[in-house]
Image (cartoon, rainbow, N blue to C red):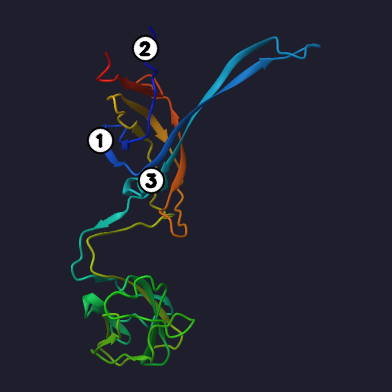
Amino acid sequence: MLSQPKTIFGIHQLTAYNICNGEPYGTAKVLGSAEIASSGELVPLNGGSSKYPWQVERGLITNEVTLTLREYPNFLYELLLGKAPTVTGAETGGSVSTLENVEGSSVSDATTGIASLAISSAVDVKYSEYVVVAVSATEVDVYAYTDVDFAQGAAGEYQNDALKITATPLTIATGVAVTIPNFGIDLTGGSGTIGLTIGDTARFTAKPINTGSTDVVIGSSTEVFKDFGLLLAAQRAGDGAMQLVDLYRVSGSGMPIVMTENAFSELSTTVTAYRDSVRNGVYSVKTIASSSEC
């Protein structure tokens, strides 16, 4: 009598781990697929008048692993883009970054420009990057790069197609805080006589009340790429059968970030598995048979 067919159904989990100490970097469970393509080269011996090879030998085998995920766990940035995100805990009052000069140096200045930023109304802070532009020696306009969060708190709106959010210029006065209307952020003037240079700009980022956030800069000089181990778990079948594929050493470089109209993001990336001399292999496949098999 023939035994039951050995099958694989679905995918359950992906876990990346440190190849030096075995500790996991993290796991992903919102997965589309994982495909290990072991592709071997066949090397023919040709010669003479024969239209067919005299002999064929096996050449190199490559192991490309294509992963399709529908989530963006932090460890993917570290392993595939070379930089681990900075993780910030919950901010019950929101937050605003420091003001950074972009054009010129007069807007962000502790004495003659804007000395600091502060949140005046956390419920009105909207998630965006902002630009402050000097329009006179004592006045500025403020622009927002996105209106994705304008419904937060007091409604925000663009004043024109240039993305300006201030209906009239804000006056920067010595030691005085002026609020960006409906955005809950104060700009406080420096300690001396205010003297902005028209056309100078500075930027900042604001975050609304949140339960946590991550920030990562890709392409910096501090990137470090790491090879890693990768364990793939198939879905547990109805009869209890399960499969684990352990890729001992994996090298990856690059990861797409996909945004599609009215759809959850799905990324597909390919990594390469290679031989681990200590474990004497490239990967292992482990299967546990049905628990209900007779």
Q: Position of residue 161 (x, y in %)?
A: 49, 81
Would you place residue 93 above or below residue 225 in this image? below
Would you place residue 144 above or below residue 279 in this image? below
Disc 3 marks which residue?
224
In primary-sequence order, the first of circles 2 and 1 is 2
How far apart are the two marked residues, 1 and 3, measured between alpha carbons?
A: 18 Å
**Which residue does the image show at 36% across and 22% down from the upper left?**
285
Disc 2 marks which residue?
3
Mark 1, secondary structure of its residue: loop
**Which residue does the image show at 32% across and 32% down from the upper left?**
235
User: Crowding near pointer 1: few (<14 within 10 Å), some, many (20+)?
Assistant: few
Disc 1 marks which residue?
23
Outermost residue, left side = 92
Image label count = 3
Q: Amino acid at mark 1?
A: Glu
Q: Amino acid at mark 3?
A: Val
How far apart are the two marked residues, 2 and 3, measured between alpha carbons?
A: 49 Å
Q: Quadrant of residue 273?
A: top left
How far apart are the two marked residues, 2 and 1, measured between alpha carbons?
A: 38 Å
**Which residue does the image show at 43% across and 85% down from the upper left?**
159
